Amino acid sequence: MESTVFNVPTLSCSACSDKIQESVREIKGIGDLSVDLKSQQLKVEYNPSDINPDEIKKHISKMGYEID
């Protein structure tokens, strides 16, 4: 497993945080993850043989959130 941190500047409430967590957890290859509302960051562990950071970013962007 590898890990990465994404900035999600449009993350503004706990409902958004929950929505992102629930959706990302369903992606094949995702391990542990946490969303920090205060810092507007998403920390994700992932299996690089299943998914890469760009694919995770695309998934979150399709949900309507800005991510970098």
Image (tube, helix red, strand yellow):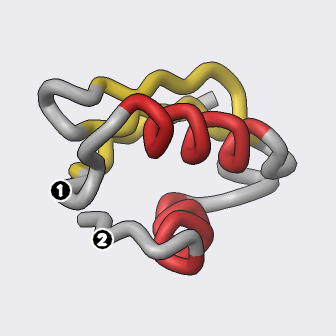
Q: Which residue is mark 2?
A: 66
Q: How many marks?
A: 2
What amino acid is at disc 2?
Glu
The Cα–Cα distance between marks 1 and 2, rounded to whole angstroms, is 6 Å
Between residue 66 and residue 16, name the one nearer to us: 16
**Residue 7 appears left or right of 22:** left
Query: Residue 31, percent across and down?
Result: 70, 27
Q: Element at badge 1?
A: loop
Query: Residue 22, percent across and down?
Result: 70, 37
* Residue 68 in sight in this render: yes
- Residue at screen point 70% across, 58% down: 51
Q: Element at badge 2?
A: loop
Q: Residues within 10 Å of mark 1 (few under 14, many from 20)?
A: some
* Residue 47 in sight in this render: no
- Residue at screen point 49% across, 37% down: 15
- Residue at screen point 49% across, 60% down: 53
- Residue at screen point 25% across, 45% down: 12
What amino acid is at disc 1?
Pro
Q: Which residue is mark 1?
A: 9
**Quarter containing the N terminus:** top right
Query: Residue 33, percent across and down?
Result: 55, 25
